Amino acid sequence: MENASTPTSTRGAGRDRLLSAARDLVRRQGFAATSVDQLCREAGVTKGAFFHHFASKADLGVAAAEDWAQATGAMFAAAPYHDHDDPLDRLLAYVDFRRQIIAGEIEEFTCLVGTLTQEVYHQHPRIRAACAASIFGHAATLEADIAAVMARRGLTGFSATSLAAHTQAVLQGAFILAKAADDPGLATDSVDHLKRYLVLLLQDPERRTA
Amino acid sequence: MENASTPTSTRGAGRDRLLSAARDLVRRQGFAATSVDQLCREAGVTKGAFFHHFASKADLGVAAAEDWAQATGAMFAAAPYHDHDDPLDRLLAYVDFRRQIIAGEIEEFTCLVGTLTQEVYHQHPRIRAACAASIFGHAATLEADIAAVMARRGLTGFSATSLAAHTQAVLQGAFILAKAADDPGLATDSVDHLKRYLVLLLQDPERRTA
DNA sequence: GTCAACATACCAACCAGTTGGTATGTTTTC
DNA sequence: GAAAACATACCAACTGGTTGGTATGTTGAC
């Protein structure tokens, strides 16, 4: 997802540019530290345009989380891990794909909705809810494959829902460690552990070629 | 860690009360959304006292991260999981202990330094560094036990350092999911997966009584 | 008496949001 | 088809309050 430069574009692109600016600035520095003025400068519009499209700064936050869910949903829906027929192969390929897109500057691969949730969960319940919908909505896309593998191997002791959510917890936590260390390697290391866990948990031991 | 009420205390407690206020307010609503005025109200002092003790708001952030590392370090050093002789037992007891303290309001069990890192990593490198020291300093306390288990069982393919860091990634991510869902259960579920991973990875299969 | 800890008054810049417009696009009426 | 009416997108200036911080004064412990 690229940063929109300030174009001499046609009317009507202001809202999209504001959402794009929000995605980048909030991932880099958080929601509260990102002012409406700064968003407008980055988007190349004025405050009047901002408040034409959004009733408040908080409304922009909700729209940004929803836009994130839509854009990432589309990106994941089109990702190559769907090419696998076997549900476990598909799940492991998903984790490989998540690892692969950990690249570039920290704010380019970290998660808008995880970042937003962390600081606004208490004071902005509507933003929190939009973030939850994005995070758990995405986790839900993994549940069918996890459930299929569990059924195939007769696994119990945990649910597909909790394992799907756990994959997102690892990713979110990995992003925090990458930010703390200023090193994407911390994130890829945790994703490697996630893959190792899924293999140990879900793969038939006879299939393992370690 | 309890919130300090506004007492008629002796002089000289202002700094500690500001740090305590920072811990609570930042965990609940983030750093940028927590103003110096709000911190002073919560601590029961004035801006003069604030700026006597801290050169800037950012300095308060660094001090808060360092205070957090010191306080949690002491708490973990005194925790019962150290009672175990066997390194794997001790590690698993550590995870059990982390699960046990996930209780009460969200801001009571979530992590100050993880929350801080997420939003300030880009604009406040000194706060980021203090948070990294806290997170990875704590992870380092687990490395010896992990290394001992790896050596005992001849395990390769990952390092003690990366597995120790991974435990912290899971915890940080678990806290984000708890905030998103407004439900501590999301956090305990991920901690359960962490324990399951450590058992699968590190425990001799013959010892498992599942 | 000295000095650390604290309080008060104040500052310039910034904040989210509002106001009164203009420019452009669309719809309705003739 | 043209023009009026209306809707939408956007602008620049403005508002009251908040912000991080500074300067100066006061208080209490030693």
Image (cartoon, coloured by chain):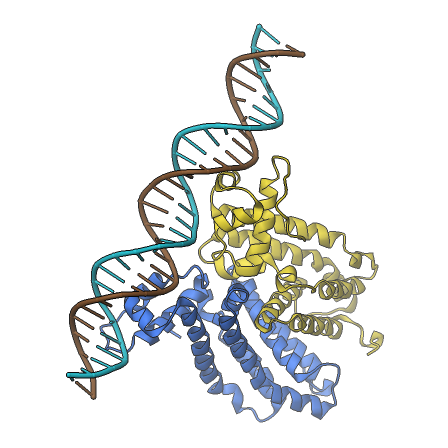
Chain colours: A yellow, B blue, C cyan, D brown
In-image side of B139 versus C5 (left or right) = right
- Can residue A66 be seen here? The reply is no
* Residue B149 quadrant: bottom right
Residue A163 rendering spot, x and y as whole percentages? 66, 66
- Can residue B90 be seen here? The reply is yes
Residue A69 rendering spot, x and y as whole percentages? 63, 51
Taking the spot 46% from the left edge, 74% from the top edge, the residue there is B65
The vertical placement of B126 against A168, above or below, is: below
The vertical placement of A149 against B161, above or below, is: above
The residue closer to the viewer here, B40 or A127, is B40
Residue B78 rendering spot, x and y as whole percentages? 46, 87
Residue D21 rendering spot, x and y as whole percentages? 36, 65
The residue closer to the viewer here, A44 or A77, is A44
The vertical placement of B78 against B191, above or below, is: below
In-image side of A128 versus B36 (left or right) = right
The residue closer to the viewer here, A5 or A156, is A5
Taking the spot 50% from the left edge, 60% from the top edge, the residue there is B182
Task: Name the quadrant of the N terminus of chain B.
Answer: bottom left
* Residue B162 quadrant: bottom right
Number of callouts in the render? Answer: 0
In-image side of D29 versus B75 (left or right) = left
Task: Name the quadrant of the C terminus of chain B.
Answer: bottom right
